[in-house]
Amino acid sequence: MKKLKFGSCLPVFSNCADRYVQSGYGVNYTLAQVLERAAQVRELDGIELVGNWHINEGNFKEVTGLMKNLGIKAAMIVPDLWTQGKWGRGTFTAKDEKTRREAVAEVKMSMDMAASVDCDKIDVWLGQDGYDYAFQADYIEAWSQIKEALAECADYRKDIKICIEYKLREPRTHLFTTTAAKTKLLVNEVGKKIVGIMCDTGHAQAAGENVADAVATCNELLWYIHINDNYDQWDDDMMFGMVHTIELLEMLYWLERIGYDDYYTLDMNPYREDGIEAARECIAWVNGLRDLMFHIGYDNITEVIKTGDSTKISKMLREAICGHK
Amino acid sequence: MKKLKFGSCLPVFSNCADRYVQSGYGVNYTLAQVLERAAQVRELDGIELVGNWHINEGNFKEVTGLMKNLGIKAAMIVPDLWTQGKWGRGTFTAKDEKTRREAVAEVKMSMDMAASVDCDKIDVWLGQDGYDYAFQADYIEAWSQIKEALAECADYRKDIKICIEYKLREPRTHLFTTTAAKTKLLVNEVGKKIVGIMCDTGHAQAAGENVADAVATCNELLWYIHINDNYDQWDDDMMFGMVHTIELLEMLYWLERIGYDDYYTLDMNPYREDGIEAARECIAWVNGLRDLMFHIGYDNITEVIKTGDSTKISKMLREAICGHK
Amino acid sequence: MKKLKFGSCLPVFSNCADRYVQSGYGVNYTLAQVLERAAQVRELDGIELVGNWHINEGNFKEVTGLMKNLGIKAAMIVPDLWTQGKWGRGTFTAKDEKTRREAVAEVKMSMDMAASVDCDKIDVWLGQDGYDYAFQADYIEAWSQIKEALAECADYRKDIKICIEYKLREPRTHLFTTTAAKTKLLVNEVGKKIVGIMCDTGHAQAAGENVADAVATCNELLWYIHINDNYDQWDDDMMFGMVHTIELLEMLYWLERIGYDDYYTLDMNPYREDGIEAARECIAWVNGLRDLMFHIGYDNITEVIKTGDSTKISKMLREAICGHK
Amino acid sequence: MKKLKFGSCLPVFSNCADRYVQSGYGVNYTLAQVLERAAQVRELDGIELVGNWHINEGNFKEVTGLMKNLGIKAAMIVPDLWTQGKWGRGTFTAKDEKTRREAVAEVKMSMDMAASVDCDKIDVWLGQDGYDYAFQADYIEAWSQIKEALAECADYRKDIKICIEYKLREPRTHLFTTTAAKTKLLVNEVGKKIVGIMCDTGHAQAAGENVADAVATCNELLWYIHINDNYDQWDDDMMFGMVHTIELLEMLYWLERIGYDDYYTLDMNPYREDGIEAARECIAWVNGLRDLMFHIGYDNITEVIKTGDSTKISKMLREAICGHK
């Protein structure tokens, strides 16, 4: 059985804060300590580095040096389009041209950074591009601006893939790049070979999607995933598998079916947990549910799907989950 | 290990219709056939009879005769407060007194029917008592009307328990008796010993409740349950366990913990399934998840809850669900 | 100021039923009476005719004769892909080829019917094409099947436009054609000039969309709309404007902005209302909110959108809604 | 017409941060500057002071001195039960007794502080008391702990009212004190005259409540309100009236009806707005919607509610909102 590649976002190993406990629920760590903590999870192959939060042109060599020593790869470079107040009213869709140009420059710089650490992709999450109130956005112009900015970035260099991460809401009450289908529409309309989709399982769930359906919709355009879980209303960033157990099992089947073979990257916020333990649990859930899938049998699942018979599906899942020992 | 008592609503074995396919998705059956179909599910001990749909003063003897022949008990009698157009603008809270009196009479008649078939309880679901638009309800008066009507019914005879079934919405966009807490508040304010709560797992989920929390909130007032599953947005009446697998496992633990020992009654709408197969699957899920609970160990679960440690919880559940064979 | 064209679905004037009150909340009317009731609402220009419910090859002449006498046009012909049990497990995506062929034939027949009553479009709502449970659908194959069937219908005749109506859920727990973006993706992938989008305001809301954003996303592909309102969780089919007042005002602005000039068709289910009164109210809301828009000033709105300044938006709306008299 | 008393939370005038932009979307202000900004909104009568964030035993005299100079009263004192990591796993329901005792002490200290600034109430929001995962909480024990702690606080001194603020989720995925009904149940079970309810309009909406229904449920136990708006999924803390326009108009009617006469306190997070402008807009919306209510006529509304006739309601609201000029 194929061994998966696991990655992680760094908040998993940091002191997680929210708007109420702004000083964080845990212990403060330096970036070096955070990386050391990540390195304690042996199954991890790579991490994500977010601009401003973790890397900038000044500390880039130092950080990548630390990573080299610890044997951690860069799974993903994330341009800072959402960690500073200056992006609050939008990046590619900011009402002022200066901010729009800065945002494009940030993305290009991230592509260069990615190249310099042998990472082949960046994650463009337009988390501040959206609106909070009715009558606040020009939907048509915003969509054009996103497409133009992406096209310009895509033309900047051909060796770094641009993965568009979608989300329905938060930090704005409405974002523009909301669902798998809307992102696929965007990718098609941009029409550049190096632009694809990144699916965060929790974003899919909180956007009203069945995440298995979402990854199948992305199909060959699915270039990267974030894994976590939630209660559908919000991006709770919980441990994978603890809520949508069956739906995430189904997603693992569809990732296999569409031949996804990139990172399974943890994007959790273990506010009240030890991040190292939580990361290990997440990875164990992915492996455990995949074991369950192969125990049922990949081909058996495919056959049951062909029938569409929900009582057969029920029997198959129930026996796998309960019917043993 | 204690054997559970299983019951069923009759739509499980009937031709289920919705507002689009009003002639039903399946085959039409006579009530006699529906009962025969129910009898094919050996694990069932009793069924629910709904006024107007299944029973009335005219056919009552005939129906109960059929049941006797088939060896099926009446698990629950349900007064018709929601199957006819005349109830559409409310029963206990109708704006006209005539309808309110009729509703009380219907409930009393159901209590008599229950007594005559050795069923010790009725299910008062105020499904038409609520509102669709802002400014349509007098919330304070409606609440008083519900309390007065219930008190009058409770005084009618002392040997039949009145179980209040709650739901957030449907068929109105808003109902009055919405959640476990609101129903407990109602029961407390009515202050009659024979008034308690009936919890439908799907209603709890669609009201934004964690169903384990809901049954624990009801505690000694929980006198009856309906089991099914859904996707939180609506009362989809699906097979039990197929969506909220872990949360329903937790509910089974809490039912054990509070000493619940009445029926586990299927309230499913198998629109596109064979009802007999679907019923068997539901029952098998309940038994299967309870097996899983005892496999983990009731006391072990109690200990883990005491720690509140989510990575321990994760390990416990993950190993039980995936880590075997 | 331009006069709008209003249409209506016929359940507005019929006896509305749901799964609890299957005999309906109101009075039964013959189809002739329903049409006469529709004719009493003078502002209506046309109605929708649904296959099986209202028309078939047998009664088609009679029905259209009645309409002629009453001076009502056919605003839309709706192929029956969702009113009979035989469609319950899908039409274009049914697991059996026979059903898939029948569904395509039904659509073609509807196109012919439309042509014969000078109606230039049909509404393809794939309400039974989806899934209820995980592992029940082959998402990739289903998507191909929908595209192929639509392409075949589009090639059947060139004079009838095919409008795809989208919805997230109901009657299945999940449908395939879910959102404006997914439908636009479908239309693009089908690649036929006569295939476009139909947006039901309530479907958009219940799919997590801001409906103004949705119609702007459709833009030149928006060929038809259904108007109603709801509480976001479900397709409540309420009177227009009673919940999402400001968001629907915004949608009216965007319909003006994208130059939409087809029917504003009421798709309400006035279970507990008089349909004639409810229809008049809906139409009055559309006209009233448009008056409000022009009172604020179309160009003033456009300017405020350019600023993206939410306190200015607040002032503009607040003064229009409250600050007068 | 009665003049309302307006209050405000201080984040309205501060630099609002979230988990992405932890340094805030705006400008950093000292507490003195924040108070000066609040003082610029002439309609404000009082503000809320949160323990740890704004006040502690050390700075209490200084802060209240500043307030005196600016002519601002303390509308509410909020014990810190949710701003520090030490509360992350609960306060009254923490698994360890030490934290539970600390929490009770914090509340008592807040009562003393309130008394010393002539503020007659405190706001107990148990925002960290809940759970994130299934099997993490002992629902029954937690409920007992909350009741015991509240009873002890209520016995500490008789001159300070304790208002329980409820919320469904955030910062935990599930809280214990979730809805108006559950809080009323709690208040009843605690049984102390100085314990009542505080309703935040946005919390009510995000808990699936119609906020007019919620305040009517609280009725004479409603001692304080927070006003803001959101899109039902989350506590977006937006400007009042911009989403639930009609439902908030209905709430203003019911506040009048139940005789509510305490503060209307702004609890907004104007991340991307100028807080002073946003506060003025909120207040103007409250006053504007109340003008609309009196324009329609309080007694006329009462009459329409008695009919329960939704087309009459529609006409009443539509004419008030659109039918003018």
Image: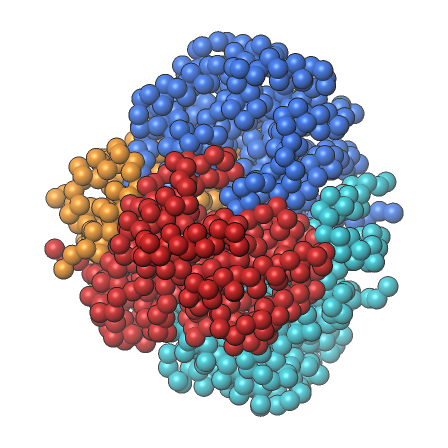
Chain colours: A red, B orange, C cyan, D blue
The residue shown at (74%, 77%) is: C69
Which image quarter: residue C97?
bottom left
Q: Would residue A117 be seen by someone viewing this image from the given angle?
A: yes
Q: Nearer the viewer, residue C221 or B37?
A: C221
Q: Would residue D170 be seen by someone viewing this image from the given angle?
A: no
Residue A237, above or below C143? above
**Quarter of the image with the N terminus of chain B in it:** top left
Residue D156, above or below A69? above
Q: Position of residue D70 (x, y in %)?
A: 72, 19
The residue shown at (47%, 34%) is: A23
Q: Is residue C73 left or right of residue A189?
A: right
Residue C190, above or below C287? below
Q: Nearer the viewer, residue C92 or A81?
A: A81
Q: Is residue A55 left or right of residue B200?
A: right
Q: Position of residue D283 (x, y in %)?
A: 72, 33
The residue shown at (63%, 28%) is: D30
